[in-house]
Amino acid sequence: MNGFDLYQYMTTALITHPDCLEHITPPGHPEQVARLEYVLNALEGFDLQREKAPLVADDDILRVHPVAHLNALRDAAPTTGLISLDADTHMSPGSLDAAFRAAGACVKAVDLVMGGQVANAFCAVRPPGHHAEKETPMGFCLLGSIAIAAKYALDHHGLSRVAIVDFDVHHGNGTQDLLEEDARVLFASTHQMPLYPGTGYPHETGAHDNVLNAALPDGAGSAAFRKVMQDQVLPAVDRFSPELLLISAGFDAHKADPLAGLTLVEDDFDWVTRQLCDLADKHCGGRVVSTLEGGYDLDALAASVAAHVQVLKERGA
Ligand SMILES: [Zn+2]
């Protein structure tokens, strides 16, 4: 042992898996393989602790989804070709493993951050997860990855308070459905309204006043986004005083995104990441786990993820 070993070198983990490239969607579908390729290319030059995502354990899924959901996904998974679960949500032969890796990445990120091996973590995965409800895959999502990670942190690591901030342009109806009855979780979402999936009204406040929905109108940009963050989301997280902060990092509020009408730019994702890291520093030793949700303009997605991870990296150093 030399002197250097006495000081733990903290960094940012990047967790991903090649299986996440094997979830194939129909031609022209916005949630496409190229999204993850662009994200990984954008992060290629970053000095990060690179980790392979494990397959999530059934027991970890079953903390939030009933076994019927797991069985239905396994029954639906095709051996060739594509099948449609609804108009937006499809499965190819590689989809189940991709979704299991996406959730597994979030669980592993919790382990790495809680164990002090890294300061924070970003999961570069697909399919996304925040629309998957208890028994309903929807909105490109099969498993509620961030909700699975939250329950894992609570039950496996014995935490008492986990906050999730979801800045994807769509309401995280699935995360809300999976966690709104658990007083140990704060779920706070900013999203455009009206927009898919049609939920996320301010009056949806959870069973324990543990859900915060901040809706933004079509066309809202940096100023409106930062205002609802500063006036509503950040103070709620501050009051909740989480022991771990999870981020559903969707980048489809970007002005270039084809699926929505907000007009954020990369600097807004830099800004919100800094705000969230400040709160994590204040309450939970900087422990942040972020996972990729939406973001469908390939270049805007790549640049936005790079801005987000750059902040995580700076704050984790
Ligand atoms: Zn979205």
Image (spheres, grey):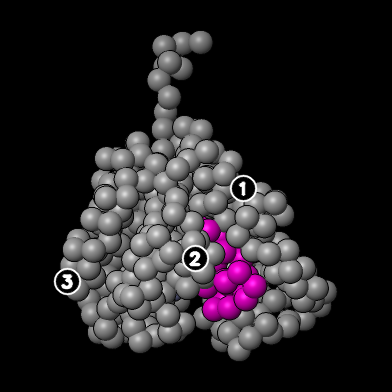
Q: Which residue is mark 3?
A: 223
The CA distance from mark 2 to mark 1 is 24 Å
Determine the secondary structure under disc 3: helix
- Left or right? Give the position of 210 relative to 179: left
Label 2 close to label 1 by CB (< 8 Å): no
Which amino acid type is shown beneath numbered disc 1? Lys
Label 1 close to label 3 by CB (< 8 Å): no
Which amino acid type is shown beneath numbered disc 3? Ala
The CA distance from mark 3 to mark 2 is 26 Å
At label 2, counting other C-alpha atoms closer than 10 Å, the crowd grade (few under 14, some 14-19, many 20 or more) is many
Q: Which residues are magenta?
A: 129-147
Sequence-earlier tag: 2 or 1: 1
Question: Viewer-nearest of labels 1 and 3?
Answer: 3
Determine the secondary structure under disc 1: strand
Question: Viewer-nearest of labels 3 and 2?
Answer: 2
| Whether residue 71 can be seen here | yes
Q: Residue at left 69%, top 84%?
A: 84
